[in-house]
Image (cartoon, rainbow, N blue to C red):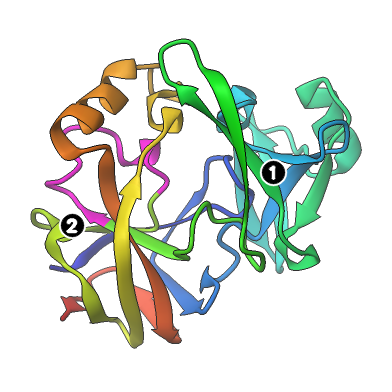
Amino acid sequence: MRIEEIWRYPVKSTCGERLTHAPVDERGIEFDRAWGIFDPATGLVLTARREPALLFLSSQVVDGAPVITTDDGEDVSSDESLSAHLGRPVELRSAADGPATFENPMNIDDETDWFQWQSAGRSFHDGRSTISFTSRGTMRDWDPRRFRLNVILDGDEAETRSGRAMIGSATITVREPIERCIMVSRAQPGIDRDLEVLKTIIRERDNQLGMGAVVSSPGVISVGDELRT
């Protein structure tokens, strides 16, 4: 199986940027989930679970810093412009400052029964894994942007792979399948809200799509590189 697409999401829950190659280390793809939008009123780093408007912002890295733009191209990278756009005081915060707390609804139909968890620090990934992947076949005809995965492989069922693998010049250790949440059903530019996406994953895949891994040995990955086990 070979890499078809590489994605990086510099600011958590915003749309990301597609790359042709990327350095990877113990934090995952360089600058992936390296920043989040902090809400001082709640003490939480916002995600699109609670603030769907984040899915209509895009982020990219320019000269080592995040640049955030709206769907119509307005630059809202400063705390003041982000706050004005979202209608609440917020701050752009680096994962290097330490762990953050997030929240997620347990009830997917009416998005109630919220619970909280804390990131491991150094990056704002949801779980223990710092780089994620799946195959084109696993995603069926769903838009890959729904799943916020880093690497899309050609072929079918990358989820069957586990243990240590080489990808590009890096070594990864595949940890576990990724549990899915309401985010995959959210609307974003060019994608309609669709609860059936999550319900289908729950019904047919035991609520798992994609594999989470950690980088055991740093390197560089590029489109066309083979995943070797």
Instruction: Look at 61% across and 53% down and name the residue there.
Output: 60
Task: Judge by depth and name the residue closer to the eye, 81 or 110.
Answer: 110
Residue hosting label 2: 159
Could you tell whether 138 is left or right of 146 in the image? Answer: left
Task: Judge by depth and name the residue closer to the eye, 169 or 164.
Answer: 164
Against 135, residue 115 (above or below) is above
Against 36, residue 174 (above or below) is below
Mark 2 vs mark 1: give the one in front. 2
Image x and y of residue 208, in percent: 26, 44
Q: Residues within 10 Å of mark 1 (few under 14, many from 20)?
A: many
Residue 208 lies in the magenta-colored region:
no
Instruction: Look at 75% across and 40% down and name the residue there.
Output: 44
- Of helix, strand and loop, which one carries label 2? helix
Task: Judge by depth and name the residue closer to the eye, 84 or 90.
Answer: 90
Mark 1 belongs to which amino acid?
A: Ile
Residue hosting label 1: 68
Q: Residues within 10 Å of mark 2 (few under 14, many from 20)?
A: some
In which quadrant is the C terminus drawn? Answer: bottom left
Magenta segment range?
Answer: 134-148
Image x and y of residue 34, in percent: 65, 60
Residue 220: numbered disc: none
Image x and y of residue 83, in percent: 85, 30
Quarter residue 95 falls in: bottom right
Disc 2 versus disc 1: distance between alpha carbons? 32 Å
Against 172, residue 178 (above or below) is above
Quarter residue 81 falls in: top right
Could you tell whether 99 is left or right of 54 in the image? Answer: right
